[in-house]
Amino acid sequence: MANASPLLTTPFDERSTAQEVLADVDLSGRRAIVTGASSGIGTETARVLALQGAAVTLTARDLVAGETAAAQIRQSTGNRAVDVRPLELADPSSVATFADRWDGPLDILINNAGVMAIPERTLTPGGDELQFATNHLGHFALATGLADALRASGDARIVSVSSSASLRCPVLFDDLTFAFVAYDPFAAYGQSKTANVLFAVEADRRWARDGIRANALMPGGIATNLQRHVDPDALAEARRQAGASSDLKTVAQGAATSVLAAASPLLQGIGGRYLEDCQEAQTIASRAESDGRHGVAPYALDADNAQRLWDISEQRVASLSP
Ligand SMILES: NC(=O)c1ccc[n+]([C@@H]2O[C@H](COP(=O)([O-])OP(=O)(O)OC[C@H]3O[C@@H](n4cnc5c(N)ncnc54)[C@H](OP(=O)(O)O)[C@@H]3O)[C@@H](O)[C@H]2O)c1
């Protein structure tokens, strides 16, 4: 299936590192939040933003781990403007508190935190499936709670870290919690990652006029704590079924598309896209066309789906409001 407009391309690719992507970009005076920055791609994303001069807030559930990451970033970059704040995305009161305490403009919001393939169907106290609640609803509440701060920037970007796992499942509008459809850990993860793309599509449609642009992306396959719930053999089998090679990116490469979307001049004025390997992804017609790591499904970029998910998410967040 062809994309409607020419795909965005950049001089960077799957081997580029985050540091290379932002090598010439001065971020002094810019304020950024990176969720889930106590490990993996989030820590490297925060480090490179700080290296280029941004004031960076790392969010963490485990404040000791968050502070350890922040201390290393301050030490290695010489940038003192790096702090850590608590955020539990599956807890609406934690998200509300974080957003309420934010003061002043926000230039970059990177919705990076995520949890993958929880083995058993698990619901939050509010009744949402845990991966959907964490990966999508928590970030939705965060971004809408910070919308005024993003508007105050005048030139803000939101980055929604999704995954090619989105190819595994659309948003099941009639069964968001897998009450009827048999629960599958990767399908539920896939649903949440499709929601991450649809969020970017609709956020960009609504907020571009306010100077807020939003894009989604697949970072690549990277060995991190994300695989903690997955038996290595089951992960290898899932990759085999998806046709994905076992070649992995480094964390430095895995953060490259995030920082490109967050801060590169190459993305100035661009939104509502799904990126991978520092390029815009091809829209594909079926999973069979993907190698397991590339391509985006039409349902993930669909404007009607995006509006529908936004409305449902607003209702969920309002009903869970502390
Ligand atoms: N690694 C890959 O191959 C890959 C591929 C595609 C997409 N992604 C996406 O990339 C993003 C970063 O993942 P990663 O690979 O860097 O994994 P990671 O090292 O496990 O990082 C995920 C981060 O999210 C945080 N987190 C998890 N649940 C949370 C919650 N309920 N509230 C707040 N924070 C929470 C984790 O904190 P704790 O340490 O406290 O759990 C951790 O800091 C995720 O969105 C993931 O879906 C990764």
Image: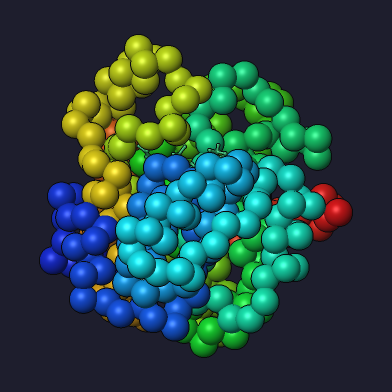
320 is higher (above) or lower (below) than 144: above
- The mark total stands at 0
Quarter residue 77 falls in: bottom left
Q: Is residue 46 above or below residue 136?
A: below
The image position of residue 98, as x and y in percent, is 70, 61
Give x and y (percent) for residue 141.
68, 58
- Asked whether the viewer can see residue 270, the reply is no
Q: Residue at x 18, y 50 (%)?
A: 14
- Of 281 and 47, nearer the camera is 47
Seen at 53% across and 42% down, the residue is: 65
Find residue 176 and report its image quarter: top right
Residue at 59% x, 85% y: name it: 152
Q: Quadrant of the C terminus?
A: bottom right
**In the foreground, 23 or 193:** 23
Q: Residue at x 59, y 81 (%)?
A: 105
Image color mode: rainbow
Please state the horizontal and vertical placement of residue 151, each as a whole percent of the image.
59, 82
Question: Is 182 located above or below residue 128 in the figure?
Answer: above
User: Residue 154 at x, y = what percent?
Assistant: 52, 87
Is residue 198 toward the left or the right of residue 260 in the image? right
Most foreground residue, 112 or 238? 112
State whether residue 145 is above or below residue 13. Answer: below
**Quadrant of res 188:** top right
Whether residue 116 is visible, yes or no, is yes
